[in-house]
Amino acid sequence: MIEAVGLTKRYGAKTAVHNLSFRVRPGTVTGFLGPNGSGKSTTMRMILGLDTPTSGRVTIGGIPFRKVPNAPRHVGALLDAKAVHGGRSARQHLLSLAQLSGIPARRVDEVLGVVGLQEVARKRSSGFSLGMGQRLGIAAALLGDPQVLLFDEPVNGLDPEGILWVRNLMKQLAAEGRTVFVSSHLMSEMALTAEHLIVIGRGQLLADMSVKDFISANSADFARVRTPDTEPELREKLGTLLGEAGAQVVPEPDGALRVTGLPLPRISDLAHGADIRLWELSPHQASLEEAYMQLTQGVVDYRSTADQRAGLQQQAAAPAPQGPGVPGQQHPQGYAPQPGPYGQPAHPGQPAHPGQPNPYAQAPGGAPVQGYGYPPAAGPGAPYGQPNPYAQPQPGPQAGAPAPMPPAAQPAAPADISTPHPEDAR
């Protein structure tokens, strides 16, 4: 069993792990989850004695790792699959580890067979793929037949067959009564492999419970209800009826209704009593990924920034003016900002690249405007009243455009430097 009590680790002013306490029990696969930078790798390094805690303690079987006699016989770990001398073959690498720990050489061939590397056992590891390196790292962890195993992203780089093999291996090891602690970002795989979860964020414990309880505590089950698409009035009627019965009803983009707060039989009875035909009535249980995202959304340190063009698009949030070029006629799209990719507002008909005409944008006179649907300069007919740095100049005078510079004010052309100066002959 692995036990951490008040575990804290600071690097200067940065606190990587803060007052972390948990237990990893034998006989079950325990998943270790958390966003990048949450302190998972630091915690594993402290478990294995590679980092010294600033305060608190962590033990394996009741004693610190550094005091475990002949530790490779009791604890196996995969933290970095690349920690292999590239000039050594897979067999030489494992044989050197076995000799350091007093493990018989025959065990090397056994674990090579377990991980499926017996065919390439005498090839240099520098030529291994990422998946082959992962298999070699797992073989090193299994070498001493330990009772406690720690794996950091064990399926990284593996193909579907390899992922299935690792999943079954973890379950088999736990079924033998071993302690199996697995860190991974693959939520779908953790849902199939782990039975218990420890989730941390920014170095602090967020959850320590079974997978089933974790999903139940961090998500809400709901029912999808769909009425005939040809009769939208039934959808409105059903939504009102369910709301009056105490349900929370949210329309979905595809026309269905997401209903929470009522069991499926009750929804069916209400629809039947109101003579409303249903095309779909199905339960939906949140996935581990959905529950994880719900819990950790406030502790993610590394997020993608919005598209840099969003700054130009945000001006579309202003009230839509009347369509320019046709007095009194509202633009068919109303210039209303529509949700674009990644949640940023996008102008209807916005082209993918600067310089392409936007069929929805109109300049004075009805000519299409180049760029992102903005007129070339602020002035009459400019729907957003802002200059467009991407706009191409249009032929002819534009409303609000500056007058051309008189000939006398034109800057002088640069001197012709192709003719050598007499002084240059020196």
Image: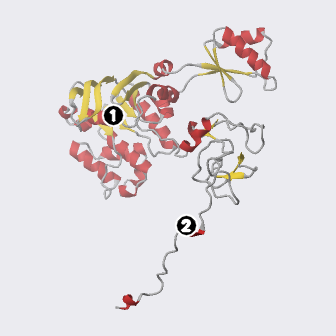
Q: Amino acid at mark 2?
A: Ala
Q: How is the image coloured?
A: secondary structure
Number of marks: 2
Residue identifier under label 1: 39
Which residue is rendered at x = 71% and y = 36% of the image? 334
Q: Which image quadrant: the N terminus? A: top left
Q: Locate residue 92, reporting x and y percent.
A: 30, 53
Q: Locate residue 387, reporting x and y percent.
A: 59, 49
Q: Choose between 273 and 243: the one closer to the eye.
A: 243
Residue identifier under label 2: 409
Q: Secondary structure at mark 1?
A: loop
Which residue is rendered at x = 24% and y = 34% of the image? 10
Which residue is rendered at x = 37% and y = 38% of the image? 152
154 in relation to 414, above or below: above
Q: Amino acid at mark 1?
A: Gly
Front disc: 1 or 2: 2
Observer able to see residue 159: yes
